[in-house]
Amino acid sequence: MSPAADPEAAYYQAVEEYFVSRRGDPLFLSNADWNLVRKWRLAGLPLRVVLRGIRDALDAHEHGWSRDRRVGSLAYCAREVEAARERWERALSGGVEGGGERDRALAAFAQALEQASGLGPRARVVATALARELRTRGGGSLPELTRWLAEAEARLVEALQAEEAEQTRASRAAEVEAALSRWCGRMPARVVEQIRKESLVRRTLEAHALPRLSLFHLEAGGEAPS
């Protein structure tokens, strides 16, 4: 994959490049395709899970009776991506190995929040409270945990930004816009806006050496396609 302008855009770029290369057609993604990738990203699906679903769908197409027909849309792969998602969620929620991986991630988030430096008083209160919640959080489904983490992250980012200088926020926003410039003419506005939002969140947290509060990086449930 060629270098992407931003890690958040890299997710979209990787899906496009893999799908186009496997489909064997030089045409790029349509607006509907980009919005489908956005749906997967908002659902918190790791890139490797999405690529496994695309691989499974196109492998089946190559061996099916309709293999001479060109796959015209990424939507053709949606069912297999959903199946890959279900396998991933079961691995993280039900299996001993997956559950352990999830618990280790939550403990790591708590530790990062406890050790964060340079926080203002408001952000410190939020970070301490979230670390305590992460340390004591028990079971629940993966979707429920994903939603809770997203809400927790939003609380933390809001507190961090409230204590930053306006110039700091403006400079960060300008960096994001520069990184996204190459995508503004290729993707629908709502997709670019989502990438912009994700990039601002990541950069705000990185400024305080904090990770994204997301299980997005966990890869239980199988190998990525080659």
Image (tube, rainbow, N blue to C red):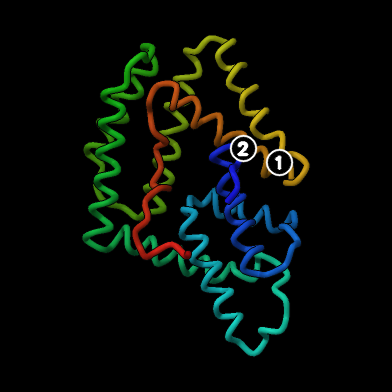
In this view, 50 is above or below 153 = below
State the image quarter where residue 117 is shown: top left
**Residue indicated by mark 1:** 183
Which is in the foreground here, disc 2 or disc 1?
2
The residue that label 2 is drawn on is: 5
Q: Which amino acid does label 2 sit on?
A: Ala
Q: Is mark 1 on a helix, strand or loop?
A: loop
Residue 143 or residue 40, whichever sits in front = 40
User: Can you name the residue that lies furthest to the right here?
Assistant: 185
| Callout 2 touching callout 1 (CB < 8 Å) | yes
Q: Which residue is drawn at 34% across and 18% down?
A: 124
Which residue is depicted at the point 25% across and 31% down? 111
In the image, is 150 to the left or to the right of 18? left
Label 2: few (<14), some (14–19) or many (≥20) C-alpha neighbours in 10 Å? some
The amino acid marked with disc number 1 is Trp
Residue 16 or residue 118, whichever sits in front: 16
What's the CA distance linking mark 2 and mark 1? Answer: 8 Å
Q: In which quarter of the image is residue 152?
A: top left
Q: Please state the horizontal and vertical placement of residue 106, each as a whole percent of the image.
A: 29, 41
Percent x, y of residue 186:
75, 46
Helix, strand or loop at disc 2? loop
